[in-house]
Every structure is written in structure tokens, then in C-alpha cells.
Amino acid sequence: MQLSLQVVQDLAPDQSSLNAAKKLMQPKKWPVRQKAAQLNSIWGQCQGSGSKPYSAMADVENHGYKCTCPSRKFPCKHVLALLWQFAETPDDFVESETPEWVSEWMQRRKRKTSAAPIKPTSGKSLSQAESNTDTPAELSVEDREKALERQQKLKAKTDAMVVTGLTDFQQWLDDQLHTGVVHLLQDLRKRCRFISARLVDAKAAQFAARVDELPSLVLSRPKEHQVNALLTELGRLILLAQTWIKQPDNLDARRAIITAETKESLLHTDNKHVETGVWQVMGEKSHTRKDGLISQTTWLMKVPTDDQTPHGSQPRFAMLLDYFPAVAGKRNAAFTLGSKLEATLVFYPGQSLTRAFIHEYTYWEKAAKVVLAESLPCIYTAYQQALITTPWLEELPFILSPGRIREDHQGQYWWQDASHEDKIIPLANKNLSKALLFDDVLEEVFIVWQGHQAELISALSATWGRIKC
């Protein structure tokens, strides 16, 4: 089972892909590199800056490949790096039993008796990637100025398209409200799909995804609450659109309307916040979006260094957010609930400083009880303060003091404070473990507050331990 470097070069879609693959040619980035000679297949897992490594696999004989990353280039940099390493040092790949995720991919492929001919494109080479001759650091001053000018022109063009799309959205919303909220609710899915498609064309991809998710968010509420939920979410969208139109360089707005900065670009800029400490995994949730991507959110909380927590201090949370195609299949949790990381996190710049990604970490499985907890008045106050700077905010994380989970005769779940039974909040969860209901008092619960209700993410039970909700 052999592979030539020429095949790797010819498979690459462009020179930039080879350059990116070269940066991944470090054994420490690949905790798994394995092969199955009888199937002519290789596979590996590449640990990037995200919370979970990408899984790449390839057929060395027929040059097929697959990766779980969301890249739109084929093959992506992870596949190219995997093939490149195998072409140079095949003995570094451990002979192993084929894992299920590789076997399933191999079975779905239509195997061929010989590899399909590769049509190489000019203007790319492994040697150029080896020398990194086109990296920005080695460009001349004149070339860097030209590159910056091109970026500014592209940004201006994109901004203008987004403004047009958001203006169309506001006009669309005026038309919907003119005909009445009830009529809008009756045809919400179709109408939202129409305007979200126009927003995608206007380069407002994240904003479009939020509009596309609006029907599911609203129609999942009890019928008597749907009008209020619809108006609340539409109000948030209008505030987000108006913020962009008035302040197109607002980082939080750009991230919510177009897309977030790449992790690589953020690492090489001064406009970031870096924080090192011990972080505890508080919960994780996944959601399949209408655009075919799965968003995977992992919540971390910084563990206090002092034995005593200062009175009135707020927990420090970090949200890790990753996207991957739904066709890649279900992913396991990135980390064990309750485990701790000694990690350096890079936070995306903005008002909230909540979204982050892990730059470096040491992981160990050791649960610890959280000592920070909030009361209901603190939740309301903190949420209102957050809305001042980010009025389109969807949710905010909190750890609640000891309490109970109750279920009413309509199947609605509620959280009840153990010390003040008159203090209750509704929960958005549709299905909860019966263990949570049978327990007298939960020592703590981790929630994300959505303004009118909370979604329970995890709970600590004296009887059952930590429970994922």
C-alpha cells in the first residue's frame, strides 16, 4: 500500500490548500494515525483549535476521501495532510482494526478496480508549500498593501450587500405585520423560508439561519404564548439589523449576521482576549439546523482559585461553538460532563466575551462540585444588563442554587427554589429524566436563561451524580 507525493499534489484543489495542509504536518496534531492494508485505507484524527478533533479518512488505492470538517474544499486540508504524511512516512501509521466510522464509509463507497485519473491543475506544488513562499509574513510591503486593499474592497462590497438584505428584511417584516400577526403565524414556515433565502443571497448567512429557525422556536411554544414569542424574537432581529446598519463594524453584530472570525485569523490578531485557568465542563447540547449543519455547544465554567468565593461574584463562563455537516453523522460529547480542563481559552472580541475556543489544554476526568450559584433576582438583573449591550441576545448561562424540578398536569416542567418555594421559573425542556423528578433537592442546576424560560442543561443530584438533561 503506497502513495506518491505527486498524487497528493494533484489531488489538492489549490496551492492555499497545500499550504494549510503543511501546517498540519505535526505528529502532535494527530493523536490517531492508522491504516488497514487489506482495505487500502488510512484514517486519522486531527486536533485543531476546536473542542473535538476532525476525523479524516482516505482510500489510498482509489483516492477517495472524507472528513468531518465543514470545509467547502475537496479534499480539505485535513485529508491532504493525512495523505501527505502517509506518502512520506507510511510506517508511522499503525496497523489497526478498522473502526466502525471508517467501515461504514468504505461500504457506502462504490469501489473501483482502479483509481480514477486525476486532472492536475497548474500553479500548485508541494515544494512551494514546504517553503511557505506565499505566507503574508514574507510578502513585500507593496504586495501586503495590495492584499489589504483587496480585503477592504471585498469587505465594502459585502457590507453593502448585507445592508440591502437587512433593509429588505425590515420591509418584509413591515408587510407581514400589516396583514396581522395571526396570519403570519398561520404561514410562518413558508414566509420565513422565503426571506431567509434572500438573506443568504445578501451574504447575511447567520442572520438568515436565525430567521429560518424562527418557526421552530415559536411554534414549539404553547399556543397561547406563540404570539408573544414571535414578537419577542422579531424584535430581537430588528434590533440586530438596525445595529448593523448604524454600526457595521460592531463585532458582535457582524458575528451574528455574517459569520465568526476564523480561529486561525483570531490567533494572529491583537484584538482578542486570552484567559488561562481550570475550567469545568458544565454541559453540552447539539442542534440540527435547517441549513444542514449541526451546531454543537459546550459550556465551560472557570473554577475559582480561592477556597472561598467572594460574595456577589459572577461565574465566568465560556461557550465553545462548533459546526459540522449533519451528513457526517452524530458526534459523541467532546468532554465528559463535570470533568475539568487546565486550558488556555481565546475569546472572540466583543461586549459579552463569552464565545471562545480552546487553544491549549490538559484534560482529566475528575468531577468537582461547583460552589457558585445564583438566585432568581440575580438572573433577571444580569440578563437585563446583558440586553443593554447585546439586545438580540438569545440566552445567558447561570448556575442556580439548590432546588427541585416539578411537573404540572399539562406536562410543563418548572424549577422551584428549595428555600423559597414561591420562586419558580418555567423550563423549556420537553423531556427530562425521571431521576430529576424523584430527587428531593438538586444540589445545583446549570441553565441557559432565554428571557421568558430556562433550558436545563445539566443537574447535580446527591443520589445520581451529574445528569445531562
Image (cartoon, rainbow, N blue to C red):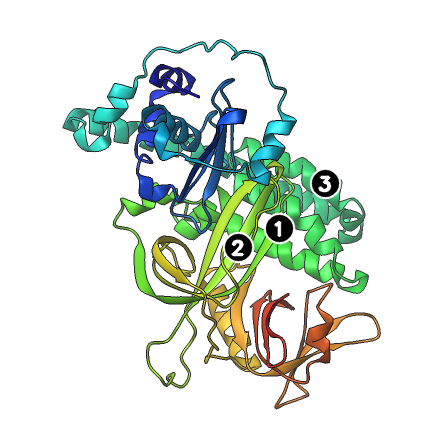
Relative to the observer, which residue lies in front, 356 or 95?
A: 95
Residue highlighted by disc 1: 287
Position in image of residue 413 (x %, y %):
73, 72
Q: Which residue lies at the image location 42% right of the left edge and 33% below the top edge?
A: 78
| Quarter of the image that includes the C terminus | bottom right
The amino acid at mark 3 is Arg
Badges 2 and 1: C-beta atoms under 8 Å apart?
Answer: yes
Mark 3 or 2 closer to N-term?
3
The CA span between labels 3 and 2 is 28 Å
Position in image of residue 250 (x %, y %):
40, 50
Position in image of residue 167 (x %, y %):
55, 40
Relative to the observer, which residue lies in front, 404 or 147?
A: 404
> Which disc is residue 297 wearing?
2
Toward the right, the furthest residue is 409
| Quarter of the image that includes the N terminus | top left
Crowding at dot 3, Cα within 10 Å, few <14 / some 14-19 / many 20+, comes out as: some
How many numbered badges does the structure rendering display?
3
The amino acid at mark 2 is Thr
Asked which secondary structure carries label 2, the reply is strand
Instruction: Report whether residue 348 is seen.
Output: no
Q: Is residue 195 above or below residue 417?
A: above
Toward the bottom, the furthest residue is 419
Residue highlighted by disc 3: 191
Q: Which residue lies at the image location 21% right of the left edge and 29% below the top edge?
A: 144
Mark 2 or 1 closer to N-term?
1
Position in image of residue 296 (x %, y %):
54, 51
Badges 3 and 2: C-beta atoms under 8 Å apart?
Answer: no
